[in-house]
Amino acid sequence: MSDEGRRATDKPILSGPIEEESLRADRDLTREELGQTVSELTDKLDVKGRAQDKLHDTAEAAKEKVTETTEAAAEKLGKAQAATSRKAAETKAAASKKAAATKQAANEKAEQAKESASHLAAEAKESATQAKQAADEKTQQAKAQARELVDKAEAAAPEPVVARGRQAADVARKQPAAVAGVAALAAVVAWWIVRRRRS
């Protein structure tokens, strides 16, 4: 608040007869002084406004600087563009060369993997074939031995026993469940007889 404003407010409001015109003038003066004070405070507290002023000043200085250095920048830009174009061409050539080498290496690795897989598959197939042949041979040997034992048993047994054995074998082939039941019953009977003899 200015000194005049302080002096104006120091006057007593009711020093004599109250005149409307005098009060209005006093009020208007107070409003004006208060408006100036608020404006001054606002300017001091208006950081954004001050920043914009500072920014405006800085922008003006920058424009002047840009105007001064335009030719130098244009020259540097030309040189930089030429260097960039040259560097881009070199980089592109190197990248193409590297991509070709990588593709070739990948193709070689894929071919090696394919050959390795084919080789392993062939080995596995050969092993499976050998295992099957070995199993077939063992089966044939077991059948031959069983047949040999049957032939020996038939040769040693009388003819009626052999005939009955063949009938039992046919029944066993046709009805394996029934044969298993009879075998279980025979085992129980044999166990019972053996137990009884021991008792």
Image (cartoon, grey):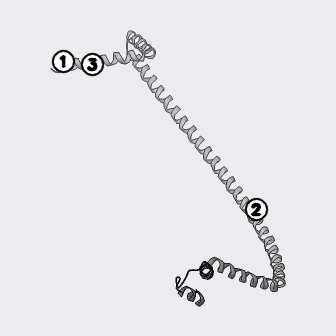
Quarter in which the N terminus is drawn = bottom right
Under circle 3, the secondary element is helix
Residue drawn at x 71%, y 61% is: 102
Left-right relation of 98 to 19: right
As drawn, 138 above or below 71: above
Under circle 2, the secondary element is helix
Disc 3 residue type (three-letter): Val
Mark closer to the chain start, 2 or 1: 2
Camera-side residue of 127 and 96: 96
Q: Residues within 10 Å of mark 3 (few under 14, many from 20)?
A: few
Mark closer to the chain start, 3 or 2: 2
**Residue 14: image x %, image y %?**
52, 82
Q: From the image, state whether disc 3 or disc 2 is nearer to you.
A: 2
User: Could you give the CA–CA distance between mark 2 and mark 1, rounded to whole angstroms?
Assistant: 92 Å
Left-right relation of 1 to 71: left
Left-right relation of 9 to 110: left
Q: Are marks 1 and 3 in contact (CB under 8 Å)?
A: no
**Picture disc at residue 196:** 1
As drawn, 109 above or below 42: above
User: Could you give the CA–CA distance between mark 3 and mark 2, rounded to whole angstroms?
Assistant: 82 Å
User: Could you give the CA–CA distance between mark 1 and mark 3, rounded to whole angstroms?
Assistant: 12 Å
Residue drawn at x 42%, y 17% is: 176
Under circle 1, the secondary element is helix
Image quarter of residue 73: bottom right
Which residue has dot 2 on it?
Answer: 100
Mark closer to the chain start, 1 or 3: 3
Which residue has dot 3 on it?
Answer: 188
Camera-side residue of 49 and 131: 49
Q: Residues within 10 Å of mark 1 (few under 14, many from 20)?
A: few
